[in-house]
Image (tube, helix red, strand yellow):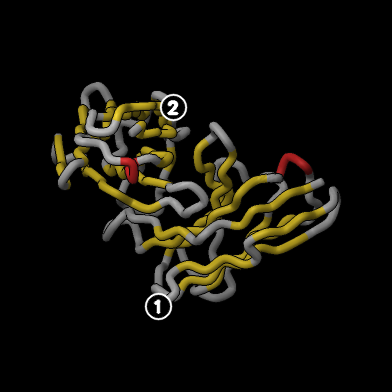
């Protein structure tokens, strides 16, 4: 039981390049989330999904797109990376809110945009 | 939407002393308040949570208190140990439905030997 797995764990991009972060969970969770973590800013929600085929915007969605084609996977895309997107990205999953609010996080993906 | 403010941003205490981290939230409808601990280079992990139908919850050396009227909640760590050094995040949400968990800015706690 691996829990929540993120790939890649490290990536360096040049401004304007594109990339996709992959999140996979094996806990059969309905909800999945992408957060970014910056010093002094806490964890800010980028996008989230409440089920296969659904996505919704979080607090800081600009510059990112997501897809949830399969229940176990949640992809975060950067179409044209900018230095402001340098951050540590965390994926998380959870059961539907009425059961438990606990988020299970992946190990994080450190992205640097030059 | 919900907004969570967390203080202090850094906290340094002597080993064995107590540490208190405080948070305020803006949405009176929020009814679920978790605390996450993030050790250096690791993922955040839930350490304790409280729902709005109780005022206090304890788990060994950690406790959380909630004041719904003032919209405040706090994390208390007693008899601090070096392994308590980490960044702590508070958060708030409405548990029902697809509401989003909103985090505070984090508190870096350092335990000095």
Q: Position of residue B59 (x, y in %)?
A: 17, 47
Image quarter for residue A82? top right
Specify whether A44 is left or right of A13: left
Chain for numbered disc 1: A
* Disc marking residue A61: none
Say few, some or many: other residues with alpha carbon within 10 Å of mark 1 (under 14 / 14 to 19 / 20 or more): few
Number of labels in the image equals 2
Closer-to-camera residue (B41/B103): B41
Q: Position of residue A33 (x, y in %)?
A: 50, 56
* Residue ID at (28%, 28%): B20
Q: Is mark 2 on a helix, strand or loop?
A: strand
- Asked if disc 1 and disc 2 are in contact, CB closer than 8 Å, the reply is no
**Residue that numbered label 1 is attached to:** A1
Closer-to-camera residue (A4/B55): A4
Name of the residue lying farthest toward the front: B113
* Residue ID at (46%, 54%): B43
Residue B30 seen by the camera: yes
Q: Position of residue A86 (x, y in %)?
A: 70, 45
A75 up-or-down from B10: above or below: below
Specify whether A36 is left or right of B96: right
Q: Is mark 1 on a helix, strand or loop?
A: loop
**Residue that numbered label 2 is attached to:** B10
Residue A53 seen by the camera: no
């Amino acid at each position: 039981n691996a829990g929540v797995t993120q790939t890649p764990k490290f990536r360096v991009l040049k401004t304007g390049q594109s990339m996709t972060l992959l999140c996979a969970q094996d806990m059969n969770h309905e909800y999945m989330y992408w957060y970014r973590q910056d010093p002094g800013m806490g964890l800010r929600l980028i996008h989230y999904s409440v089920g296969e085929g659904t996505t919704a915007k979080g607090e800081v969605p600009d510059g990112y797109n997501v897809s949830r084609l399969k229940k176990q996977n949640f992809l975060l895309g950067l179409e044209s990376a900018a230095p402001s997107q340098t951050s540590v990205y965390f994926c998380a999953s959870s059961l539907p809110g009425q059961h438990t609010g606990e988020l299970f996080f992946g190990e994080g993906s450190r992205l640097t945009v030059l | 939407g919900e907004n969570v403010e967390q203080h202090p941003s850094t906290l340094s205490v002597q080993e064995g002393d107590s540490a208190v981290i405080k948070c305020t939230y803006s949405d009176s409808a929020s009814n679920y308040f978790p605390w996450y601990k993030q050790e250096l280079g690791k993922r955040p992990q839930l350490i304790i949570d409280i729902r709005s139908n109780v005022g206090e919850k304890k788990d060994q050396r950690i406790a959380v208190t909630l004041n719904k009227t003032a919209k405040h909640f706090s994390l208390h760590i007693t008899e601090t140990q070096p392994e308590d050094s980490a960044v702590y995040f508070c958060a708030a949400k409405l548990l029902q439905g697809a509401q989003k968990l909103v985090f505070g800015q984090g508190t870096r706690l350092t335990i000095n030997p």
